[in-house]
Image (spheres, rainbow, N blue to C red):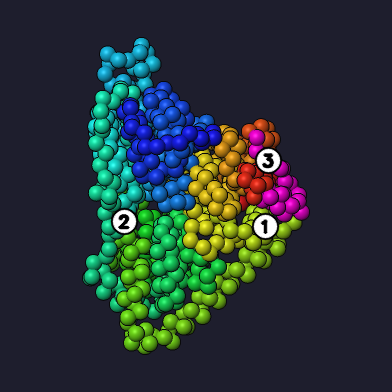
Amino acid sequence: MAKSSRVMEKPTPQYGSDVVVDLLKAFEIEYISINPGATFRGLHDSLVNYGGNHMPEIILCPHEEIAVAVAQGYARARGKPMVSAVHNIVGLQHASMAIYNAWCDRLPVIVLGGTGPMDTAHRRPWIDWVHTALVQGNMVRDFVKWDDQPASVEAVADSFIRAYRLATTDPMGPVYICYDSDVQEKKLDGEIPFPPLDRYPAPLSLQAPEEGFSKTIRWLLEAKAPVIMADWVGRKEAGFQGLIELAELLAIPVFDQYGRLNFPCSHPLNLTGMQERVLGETDLVLVLDVPDMEGAATKRAQEMGRRTPIPLLSPGTKIINVGLDDLLVRAWSTDFNKLREADLSMLADTSVFLPELVRRLKDEKNELKKRESQIEDRRTRWSKLHAEREEGLVKQARAKWDEKPIATARLYSEMAEALKNEDWVLTNGTSSGRENFYIRANKFNQILGKYKGGGLGYGLPASLGAALAHKGSGKICVDLQPDGDFLFTASGLWTAAHHKIPLLIVVCSNHSYYNDEEHQERMAQARGRPVENKTIGIRIEDPIVDFATLARSYGIWSTGPVTEPKDLGKALRDGLKIVKEGRAALIDVECQMR
């Protein structure tokens, strides 16, 4: 939808929902993603006719889950909130999966809703009754940082300011505000007080205590084989750069869990994927923003259908845990993971902790000098191991280069080649993150990371939100899109076409919800049943989805399915050309299961 051309000269709000639009503008919210609904018709009118459909601009989505996931992807890319609006009970139920994903991902998404009228004397028969709840926020309260339903226009400003501040205070997370239809549509008789926003700043970041610094520094210097694990450090550039400095200063290898891009992929100290080779001999682990420590430090084993995590760390290994995730532990969902072991645990924002830790370590000149030889020996050893990993990846890609269906190693290698001279961002990837070994990212926020909630349907809409955040920046946004996930929210292609969102969508078509094939195979083996039945109820075949034709039906340029390995490079270059013209492009690639 085009932005309004009329000039807005600080109009006076006339209705309750006009006040909401003033707040959105005051907080410089660029976009609001919606699927239209009558319970926020007052807000919708205010966005268009009072706000001029500018700051925020409406992004129309075919489903509420898409609308919220777009805002999640935008928040990943920009580090600040985008707003979504959803229609009463039914819209909130559609949106709930995406809200949960944003909660598990600790991202600042602001969801607005409409309800009512709460005054039963003002309701229409049937529809206003089945679309009203006491209170609507109950539905999502267990996986938002806060929800509110202001009962008057006068309460709207305080409610929104609190919601914004809570959403953007680490650990970040989604919030939900529900506006009664009567509040939205109330005709104002006079001025509504609008508090100065600079009087309500977000709190300063949480820093580690002195004891935490002194122990961490002493233990790091004393350790013979320290390692670092990181998952959400890369949400802020100060954390990303601080981690690089720390690793280089003491020659400590880093294992990236890819909740964000935490460490440059091609750095010689990046040993991600080699945990089994290294963790058994480490004597100290610095754990930075890793909510799932068990997953990071164990090997998953499947024996007779049972899930058995095997520890990779020796029993005497010291563990230092730094993060803020414990501040969002709730009783409903166990997204807080297994209770973490630690010899030292600190509640601190890693983006302020790491730069200060590095500064203090650099002051330990005498201690660093004494350990110079040990540090350089580590650097040489870990660099060799990194090079070994890189050589193995090249050999694997060569061995599978001409296989059909197309090997994922070739797909990722061809993508890296097509993007090598571009300023690119990988907005979405596979659950394994294996593509990151080939499409090597070295810049802050160049890989936006794995989704954390595990709800399918995330990839396309979140990528649209990220591409929206980067629109006009010259960055090439790439969605490496699994086919099963794509089918949940494929109608998001319409939003891409309508709003001219430049995004390169590479669909990995293996025609299966393959993760479940592996589970069914284990079940069959454990129970002595036919393994060949593992595909029933899982394969996306008969018919095979023609994603290229589907994309064209939504007005998206597409090609494929690409079945010949030799055709892959050209398809990627052709799609890249379309994206550079400011449009979305889809390439359907028939590829191997893994």
Say what amino acid the circle numbered 3 marks. Answer: Trp
Q: Is residue 498 left or right of residue 289?
A: right
Q: Which mark is residue 324?
A: 2
Q: Which residue is mark 1?
A: 418
Mark 2 nearby-residue class (10 Å; few <14, some 14–19, many ≥20) = many
| Magenta residues, start to end | 555-577
Residue at position x 36%, y 73% from top? 358
> In what element is the residue under mark 3?
strand
Question: Does residue 227 lie above or below 78 as drawn?
Answer: below
From the viewer's perspective, is the residue at label 2 or at label 1 nearer? 1
Q: Residues within 10 Å of mark 3 (few under 14, many from 20)?
A: many
Residue 95 x/y as whole percent: 43, 34
Kind of residue indicated by mark 2: Leu
Q: CA distance from mark 2 to mark 3?
A: 43 Å
Q: Are marks 2 and 3 in contact (CB under 8 Å)?
A: no
Residue placed most toward the observer, 431 or 184? 184
Rendered residue at 58%/58% (across/down): 423
Q: Secondary structure at mark 2?
A: loop
The residue that mark 3 highlights is 557
* Labels 1 & 3 near each other (Cβ < 8 A): no
